[in-house]
Image (cartoon, rainbow, N blue to C red):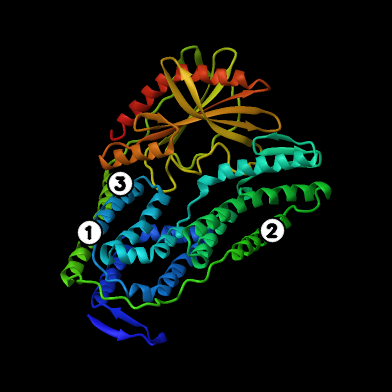
Amino acid sequence: MNQQTLPKAGIQAVVFQPWPLALTSLGVGLMALFAAYFPSFWSMVEIWQRSETFTHGYLIFPLSLWLIWRRRLFLLRQTPRPDGRGVLALAGLGLVWLLAKVTDVLVVEQLCFIALILALTLAVLGWRVVWEIAFPLGFLFFAVPVGEFLIPPLMNFTADFTVAMIKFTGIPVYREGTFFSLPSGDWSVVEGCSGLRYLIASITLGCLYAYLSYRALWRRLVFVALATLVPIIANGLRAYMIVMIAHFSDMKLALGVDHYIYGWVFFGLVMLLLFWIGALWQERPLPAEPQVAMESPVGEAPWPSFIAVTLAALLVLAVWPGYARIVRDLAQAAPVAPVDFKLPQQAGNWRRSALEPTSWKPRYLFPDAVFEASYTDGGRQVKLYVLYYRTQAQGKELINSQNVLIPQKHPVWQMPWERVRKVPLAGQSLKVREGLLQSALAKLLVWRWNWVSSTFTVSEPLAKLLEAKDKLLGRPQDAAGIVIATAFEDDQRKAVAALRDFTEAMLPELEKALAQAGAGRHR
């Protein structure tokens, strides 16, 4: 152990011998981590490049390093001590990463990559050091492009807020889902109007501001809560003001490019207001360096422990990418037969029909085979689609946010809403996603659900877990999306009854045909 006097203010600090070895061990571990899991890191960079919502990701790693650098004098007061719990955390996180990797759940894979950095730091430097830089390390999670699951509820809130404000203003408005009409024109809340990019930017800046400006935990939590709630409400106000400007200008203003410019200017003013409010109860800035010298901690971690923990961490880090590669190679090497699947000619009172109730088709990306048929029971018609996935990979899998009934801004169809419905059937029940589609000429009620690992489900997490189980056990990974649709005019209850009766009759036949197709995978 060596002592040296730091030049600033004559402060006596203790620099411990383990630090050079600890930092070297951590550097080796981080290089191995980035090398072994580089595809996970690069997948984040690719999203930063193409998405305006997540371009802030480029700043997260530099900001985190800067925040750690600010704490360097405090860190020198701590003795790095290897912690075996970090190695256990690496093993657990690696397993979760493996499950996400083999099932192509990119966001979980990316979250695990960041968490592995934290676990490795804990393993090499120990808990006391990690606690000293807990926020800079946790701040790394903002590099993960996550949050798109919030788009539907944010869209619904924006529509609720905007319509409520329009009614409060006294203007008549008709609403159906995220679509609403005023006497001056029609409006819809699309993904770009959800306010997600405002929310993510606000939370990221809010957490950084709270950390740098406050010491009390309650102040930090209150400001982060404000940074979360204010942009949601502000986005509702932004949407309402855009509609009002367009309405009172006979649809000449607040449309097109100025729609987006107005939105960002408004968001900038909201953030300035938020930081101004935060500055009113700002605490004294945190000291840049410790003001009191600290006695030397008793005992130092022996150098063999750094070597042992580093080697153990490297071994654990190498296991999961290696196992993922084995699973992938085995799946690619196995011969795969063409999909042998036949839709039934008849199920109960429903039989195949040459009449087409609709020309609409669901948008699913790259299925291995698509089967469709129309059925009638004499008075009602239902269209059935089976989208079969035999070989799945990133961007070509059943559970994918891009597999939808219609894409955004479809030239013909609109989808005011989609929700989960529990359908009572004879002796069982089935959960489906129910969506309403409408065009200028027709309305469709659509149900859809998935078949994964011989199980019908609408739960995407469950579907991914079933897929992971099959892949890791070397079982067939066949999956299919099932979509049924019927046209109606005014009475939606009749459409619900038609789809329920059709599902009750057809489900056993579909289950049998899907099982036979899956069994013939390697013929």
Report x, y in % for residue 210: 52, 62
Question: Which quadrant holds the N terminus?
Answer: bottom left
Around disc 3, counting alpha carbons within 10 Å, would you say few (fewer than 14), some (14 to 19), or many (20 or more)?
few
Residue 250 seen in the current view: no
Distance from disc 3 to disc 1, alpha carbons, whole Å, reads 37 Å
| Closest to the observer, 399 or 427 | 427
Q: Position of residue 104 (x, y in %)?
A: 39, 47
Q: Position of residue 255 (x, y in %)?
A: 74, 52
Q: Which residue is mark 2?
A: 266
* Chain-order first, disc 3 or disc 2: 2
Q: Residue at x 44, y 14 (%)?
A: 426
Q: Name the residue nearer the viewer: 106 or 59.
A: 59
**The C terminus - image quarter:** top left
Q: Which residue is mark 1?
A: 84
Q: Amino acid at mark 2?
A: Phe
Taking 218 as reference, is 337 above or below it? above
Q: Secondary structure at mark 2?
A: helix
- Indicate which label's residue lies in the foreground, 3 or 2: 2
Q: Is residue 117 left or right of residue 306?
A: right
Amino acid carrying mark 3 in the image: Gln
Q: Quadrant of residue 206?
A: bottom right
Label whose residue precedes the other's in the sequence (1 or 2): 1
Q: Are marks 1 and 2 in contact (CB under 8 Å)?
A: no
Q: Earlier in the sequence, mark 3 or mark 1?
A: 1
Instruction: Assess disc 2: are there few (<14), some (14-19) or many (≥20) residues with their C-alpha within 10 Å of its C-alpha.
Output: some
Badge 3 element: helix
